[in-house]
Image: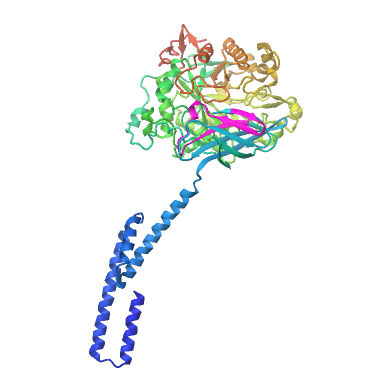
Amino acid sequence: MSDEKKDVNSRQENAGKKGINKKLIIAFAGMGAVIVGLVIALILVATSGKKDVDSSASKAESSSAVASETDDTSEEDSAADESEDESDADEEESSQESKDDKKEKGFIISYSGDNSWQDGDKVMTGMEIGIENNSDEALKEWTLELEIDQLKSCDGWNGNFKVKGNKLTVTNVDYNGEIAKGGSTSIGCNIGTGTKLNVKSAKLNGVECTVKKGKVSQNNNNNNNNQNNDKKVTEKDVKKLLKRTSKAKQGDDWLHTDGSKILDKDGKEVWLTGVNWFGYNTGTNTFDGLWNSELVTSVEAIADHGFNLIRVPMSAELINQWSEGEYPKANYNNAYNEELNSMNSLEIFDYFLKLAEENGLKVMPDIHSAETNASGHTVNLWYTDKVTVKDYYHALEWLADRYKDNDTIIAFDLKNEPHGKPNEGDAAAIWNDSKDANNWKYVAETAASKVLAKNPNVLIMVEGIEIYPKNIKKNGDYSSTNSDDYYFNWWGGNLRGVKDYPIDLGKYQDKLVYSPHDYGPTVYQQPWFEGDYTYKSLMKDCWKDNWFYIQEQDIAPLLIGEWGGFMTEPNLTWMTYMRKLIKDNHVNHTFWCFNANSGDTGGLVKDDFVTWDEEKYDFVKEVLWQEGGKFVGLDHAIPLGDNGITLKKAKGL
């Protein structure tokens, strides 16, 4: 408009200089006023149109711009205004296209190594590997080839691992072979290298991959089997689904200890014979396996098979997200678990507790890792750069407070497998009378006091560490970096420190249970497996001095939080001896594990998470609490599954 107005003024000036008469001047002035009025009207129309334009409607803007090219000059300004809108929209589209272009195509391999330790000439690293399929087609099965600097060994899970020179080859297992377009899966391993972990290159099914070091995307492929995530789901009445059963009397199932025994409210000795089911620690944000199975029938099957307790590995990070009103998406099969579609991940856990109660099962949450990560258990301590000690305590406090009136949760396992080797210094878990940040004894007592302040009724499970000084007087501060100065055991399995520095829970001492972990030679070839080992040699070389003395001397009860493995040699011999120890002494235990996707042990169910491995189950069945051919539960009112009885009807041990 300003250019047009300038032209009119110029014409008026020139006309006056040539002596044009008044009438003509008036006429010109009138014409100018009309033109100005028309221009203003056009601008108002254009401006009004501009306000009504949806910035995302680029088609309409494009049409308007094309039409403006045929208009006369009086409409050029309006067209220019609309063109600016179109330009903005084009920039938005271009920006979006740029983002899409940045999403790398093909196969993306990401990896991280959050925890490392020295093992002889090897640097061992807890490694997590993500496989992301950004190709144009779904994968039905896959073979991953990684070239790794100075590769020496690898023990993994969620895949079949093979080492040859510097090449690590991993093939899928049955439950993770299919990776949908845009989907991903993750695998993990404890990998040994001659130098710091470095993946030089990767191929998936023979195709070169982009390799990224850093955060590994968690599995987002679990729902790809049915592709129901974008479909409309039938809304369920969540409040009704979560309403607890009226069959159980609340608060009568709390347990306490007396010496090496665990007793119910009436003084009846009980036997906790349970199973582990992981997933709340891995990024699935619910139980693994629900991509192939149903939550309802899985819980029923565990109860029907006679396990009276489920240990549930969880991450402190996830619990704290829940406490802040954040609910990371739970990955499961939408079609198989329709009632879960209306729930967030915390509500799914609440629903699980209701199902457990209805089936006479009890539950023990386990802080398996600080961060949500399938390899999080390889981190030595209960905190990381991302999850602080304060965060760790808060997770336990919040969980204890939330369920303080729910005696389905009867115990808390404070932390899974604290560990660390002599050369790791402050990064290794220790056990002494200090208040050092890495002193597990001090932290366990602090954590227990926070839990019991919220709910004084629950049992407290305290695991061991990995190393303990041979001479506590000379090396009580763990200053020696010489491995010869220490006793070693499995992560979480070294409870020698209880002799010198027992856990003190004050007035709640009758809530304390020590919880070692123990495994066989297929997990790691420990020194006590050398040669023709026997039950007696295992007791002498490992079990007695590391933890069995606690029960033998009537100091406190034991619950072996993890034991298990493949039903093949050389593992089967060890499993048979461990079962004998449990059976002869009624040691409490939770078998590792229900999951089919435990790479170094296998599970009680096969890859469909529905079909039970009958050989393994029959083996474990011998150490499930039974009376008169019936499984014994820990609930006084609700029998354990279809094949069990209530604790009220049981005689006790």
Find residue 556 and report its image quarter.
top right
Q: Nearer the viewer, residue 636 or 13?
A: 13
Q: Nearer the viewer, residue 550 or 377?
A: 377
Q: Residue furthest top?
A: 628
Find residue 51 and report its image quarter.
bottom left
Name the colour scheme: rainbow
Q: Which residues are magenta?
A: 161-190
Question: Taking 621 as reference, is 29 above or below it?
Answer: below
Query: Residue 1, percent across and down?
Result: 34, 74
Find residue 505 and report its image quarter.
top right
Query: Residue 468, percent across and down?
Result: 70, 26
The residue at 50%/49% (across/down) is 102
Q: Is residue 635 visible?
A: no
Q: Is residue 121 visible?
A: yes
Query: Residue 451, percent across and down?
Result: 52, 30
Q: Nearer the viewer, residue 352 or 434?
A: 352
The residue at 40%/14% (across/down) is 642
Is 224 inside the magenta-drawn segment? no
Question: Taking 15 as reference, is 56 above or below it?
Answer: above
Q: Nearer the viewer, residue 493 or 19?
A: 19
Is 166 inside the magenta-drawn segment? yes
